[in-house]
Image (tube, grey):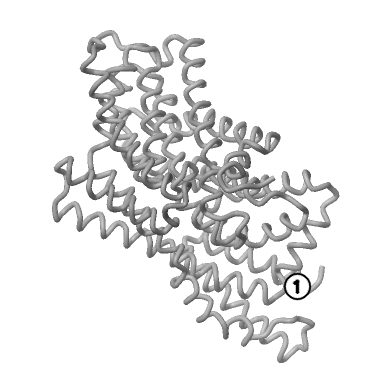
């Protein structure tokens, strides 16, 4: 093993070690990067190491790179989409939609769980904030499902897993970050939004199908409530009125992007204004709510950009030490064809999801493997959607599955951690099945972008 390989492995090992010791991600990334920049400089100056590393060419240009991140117009969409999701969470739209759907679907076996999936899909297409969606769905659904004597793992697994659709179904902040890190017009934000739409809706449909089949095979898994409101025209009308606001916002945001009326950044402004208007019309908007939404938006944005800057330091030093060449040689040297290499990358990404959040994987791993994958002739949008589907599982896989922590905080006392783990297992399997379907049937991810933006 050469010096470059040793340094690259040592960088990743040091980063993982600091994470396991509890250091914040942003500080661990930046700290490891600066430490190995010093090590590289010392090796060259005092030990005549055979490295291309230069201090001026890495650390010396970091100020320009970091400024390029914060000055990137596309990144303005991040806080606006985050604000949109938080304001929708405060507007009460989800509660109204949940109650209306329960009146319509409640009499069905598994109706409460199906309601959670439908509301979760609409939330995913309206907010894109996983934490808010998981907490909100858990608060609204777990109590009624426990009263209806639902199986505990099914109830908590449904609420937890459906909330993670927000990271995939557009508008998704993960897809915005991925488009920026991929750095190619062939995988723009608009194309990734279009590419993720069918797989995201497909996953939602698979969740509903699983609930229906499981409820039919095992009658006591999700029993129909013994007492429920009679379905009438009023219930259908209330459901229509509840669905219109989120659908209108979805059409305004995604439609303006897809039809070329607005850029992604401009569309995020439309979404933020629309969410603010909905909170006002629902009489939930006041200075306390607005102040809290702005605080949460600033906090989340600062968290993401902190990791962004730390990842920039880490990646710059890694490249300076020859990391790109090491990773390229490792990937292309695998004894497989293109399909085998792609499967290996997805497997490694899935395993990393047990220990890292999607932000770190997107900012560190994706820029390293994407150029190699593209050089093998892999379609960029297809690869990006496969990568996104793989990252979605990171919210549900312990020990660092954030959705598991979110749902635990709002669970009734009778639901234990064991119930949560058992509940998400079928949904992780469904996510992997969805990943396999997109892998073996590429048009699921590429047909819609090609139809809208043109392509082969």
Is the residue 434 above or below the residue 284 in the image?
above
On the image, the x and y values in percent for residue 134 come to 37, 39
Q: Position of residue 325 (x, y in %)?
A: 76, 68
- Taking the view exactly as shown, the residue that stands out farthest to the right is 335
Considering the image in quadrants, where does the C terminus appear?
A: top right
**Seen in the image, is 240 located left or right of residue 194?**
left
Q: Tell me if residue 258 comes above or below residue 241 in the rendering.
A: below
Q: Nearest the camera: 379 or 78?
A: 379
The residue sitting at 61% across, 40% down in the picture is: 445
Tell me residue 159's x, y (percent).
39, 32
Q: Find residue 418 and report its horizontal and vertical position in percent.
A: 45, 32
Q: Can you tell which quarter of the image residue 225 is in? A: top left
Instruction: Determine crowd level at label 1: few under 14, some 14-19, many 20+ residues with C-alpha closer than 10 A.
Output: many
Return the residue nearer the eye: 220 or 141: 141
Secondary structure at numbered mark 1: helix
The image quadrant of residue 233 is top left
Asked if residue 321 is positioned above or below residue 372 in the image, the reply reads: below
Q: List the residue tagged with mark 1.
A: 4
- Asked if one can make out residue 380 in the rendered structure from this viewpoint, the answer is yes
């Amino acid at each position: 093993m050469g010096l470059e390989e040793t340094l690259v492995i040592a960088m990743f090992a040091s980063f993982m070690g600091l994470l396991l010791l509890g250091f914040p991600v942003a500080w661990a990334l930046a700290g490891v990067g600066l430490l190995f920049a010093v090590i590289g400089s010392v090796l060259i100056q005092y030990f005549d190491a055979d490295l291309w590393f230069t201090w001026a060419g890495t650390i010396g240009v970091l100020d320009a790179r970091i400024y390029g991140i914060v000055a990137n117009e596309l990144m303005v969409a991040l806080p606006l989409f985050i604000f949109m999701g938080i304001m929708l969470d405060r507007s009460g739209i989800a509660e109204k939609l949940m109650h209306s759907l329960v009146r319509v679907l409640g009499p069905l076996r598994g109706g409460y769980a199906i309601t959670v999936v439908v509301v979760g899909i609409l939330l995913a297409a309206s907010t894109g904030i996983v934490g808010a969606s998981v907490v909100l769905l858990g608060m609204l659904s777990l109590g009624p499902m426990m009263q209806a004597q639902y199986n505990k793992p099914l109830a908590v697994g449904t609420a937890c897993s459906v909330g993670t659709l927000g990271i995939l179904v557009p508008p998704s902040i993960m897809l915005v970050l991925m488009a920026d890190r991929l750095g190619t017009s062939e995988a723009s934000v608009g194309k990734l939004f279009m590419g993720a739409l069918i797989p995201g809706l497909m996953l939602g449909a698979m969740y509903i199908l699983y609930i229906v089949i499981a409820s039919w095979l095992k009658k006591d898994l999700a029993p129909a409530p013994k007492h429920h409101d009679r379905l009438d025209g009023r219930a259908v009308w209330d459901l229509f009125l509840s669905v219109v606001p989120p659908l209108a916002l979805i059409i305004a945001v995604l439609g303006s992007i897809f039809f070329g009326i607005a850029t992604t950044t401009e569309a995020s402004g439309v979404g933020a204004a629309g969410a603010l208007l909905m909170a006002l019309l629902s009489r939930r908007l006041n200075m306390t709510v607005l102040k809290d939404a702005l605080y949460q938006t600033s906090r989340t944005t600062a968290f993401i950009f902190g990791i962004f800057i730390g990842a920039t330091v880490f990646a710059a030093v890694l490249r300076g030490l020859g990391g790109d060449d090491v990773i390229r040689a490792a990937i292309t040297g695998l004894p497989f064809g293109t399909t085998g290499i792609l499967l290996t990358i997805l497997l490694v990404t899935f395993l990393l999801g047990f220990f890292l959040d999607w932000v770190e994987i997107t900012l560190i791993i994706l820029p390293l493997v994407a150029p190699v994958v593209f050089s093998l002739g892999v379609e960029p949008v297809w690869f990006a959607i496969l990568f996104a589907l793989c990252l979605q599982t990171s919210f549900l896989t312990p020990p660092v599955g954030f959705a598991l922590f979110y749902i635990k905080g709002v669970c009734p006392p009778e639901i234990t951690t064991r119930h949560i783990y058992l509940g998400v297992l079928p949904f992780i399997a469904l996510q992997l099945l969805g990943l396999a379907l997109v892998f073996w049937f590429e048009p699921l991810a590429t047909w819609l972008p090609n139809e809208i933006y043109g392509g082969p």
